[in-house]
Amino acid sequence: MERDGFRNHGAAGPYRLRSILLCSDVHLTDDQPELTRYFCDWLEQQAQMEKPEAILILGDLFDAWVGDDVLDFGQQFAANAVINCLSLIGRQGIKIGLMHGNRDFLLGESFAQRCGADLLPDPFTITVKPDMTITLTHGDQLCTQDIHYLEFRAQVRSDLWQQRFLSQPLEHRLALAKNLRAQSEQEKKGKPMDIMDITPAEAVMLTDRHQSAVLIHGHTHRPGSNVMTNGKTRWVLPDWETNASGALIRGGGILADRHGVRPINAASRLTL
Ligand code: LP5
Ligand code: MN
């Protein structure tokens, strides 16, 4: 596939893919190598079994990403495992797309190229079959009641902020990201649950604007599906987690093809 294939398609309308495997919110970190192994094994198994036309990762693949230059320093077990896994799958003819999440919005072209992947715009709309157009998004932009987060988001997504941040030494960036993760966990304890969920009217508007029958997103870590007030279906991807002994307790994705949309639970069927 040519580079930027997904991205440059925007103006031509929905991208046509006959089958897609979706996942998000894996939150990979070198502190949890088992999680990386589960995830890569699962992707490789699904690629073999389901042979989707594309695998699209809808954000928060990494727990925190402070710039592609991390790849030039040290071991980077999780990042290198993902690069190996995705490029292997890509060589089997499966397209790979990466969407930014709120933890890894600094993933760049350099990382994508090493994976043989394209960075996806958010939202991204695809057509699986004539009557099934699906809008994909990380989901954070639908949480419009979380005013503090959206203000923070506007700041860190600006080119100027990103240029300044990326020009700081790597160790400084890693320390800032660690602080920010801790602060985020702390703040979430004080935020009402509904503020941290999507605003239903936003999801309705998004699907109406893109004339899609289905919306699939991650971010909220509340997997499941529901029919919205406009009659369209919203699916939420699961996040991934291992327990203290390193066993996978949550994870999986969604497969969409001509048969419809179905969740795939990784936690129930994988052993290392
Ligand atoms: O991620 P999660 O699930 O915990 O919570 C999100 C929102 N939090 C975030 C922050 C990320 O967790 C941290 C990402 C670190 C890696 C990024 C690399 C770049 C480093 C940048 C270093 C400065 O996205 C959380 C939402 C929640 O989802 C549910 O939607 O509520 O939002 C927050 O917690 C944000 C706070 O409400 C506002 C934070 C203000 C912090 C100000 C610090 C200033 C730092 C400088 C920025 C310009
Ligand atoms: Mn997220």
Image: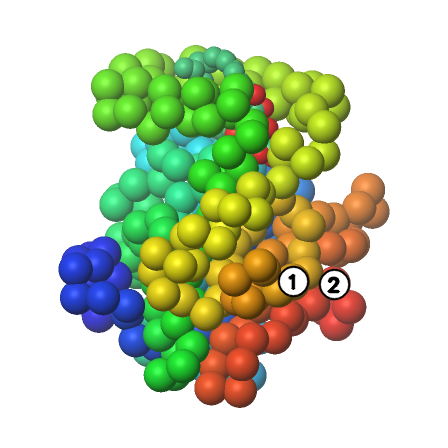
Give the residue at mark 1.
Answer: 226
* Nearer to the camera, 129 or 36: 129
Point out residue 210 in the picture as x, y percentages from the top left corner: 34, 60
Point out residue 9 in the picture as x, y percentages from the top left corner: 19, 63
Q: What element carries label 2?
A: loop
Q: Is mark 1 on a helix, strand or loop?
A: strand
Q: Residue 214 carries which label?
A: none
Residue at x-position 62% and y-position 17%: 183
**115 up-or-down from 258: above or below:** above
The amino acid beneath tag 2 is: Ala
Residue at x-position 61% and y-position 23%: 184
Residue 154 sits in quarter:
top left
Give the residue at mark 2.
Answer: 267
The image quadrant where one finds the N terminus is bottom left
Closest to the camera, between mark 1 and mark 2, is 1
**121 up-or-down from 271: above or below:** above
Q: Is residue 263 visible?
A: yes
Residue at x-position 56% and y-position 28%: 146
* Nearer to the camera, 81 or 120: 120
**236 up-or-down from 261: above or below:** above
The image quadrant where one finds the C terminus is bottom right
**Circle 1 residues within 10 Å: few <14, some 14–19, many ≥20:** few
User: Ligand 2 near label 2 (Cβ, under 8 Å)?
Assistant: no
Q: Which residue lies furthest to the right in this view?
A: 245
Q: Which residue lies furthest to the front in this view?
A: 229
The amino acid beneath tag 1 is: Asn
* Nearer to the camera, 120 or 13: 13
Point out residue 87 in the picture as x, y percentages from the top left corner: 37, 63
Q: Tell me, what colour scheme is on the image?
A: rainbow
Q: In this view, does 99 lie to the left or right of 224?
A: left
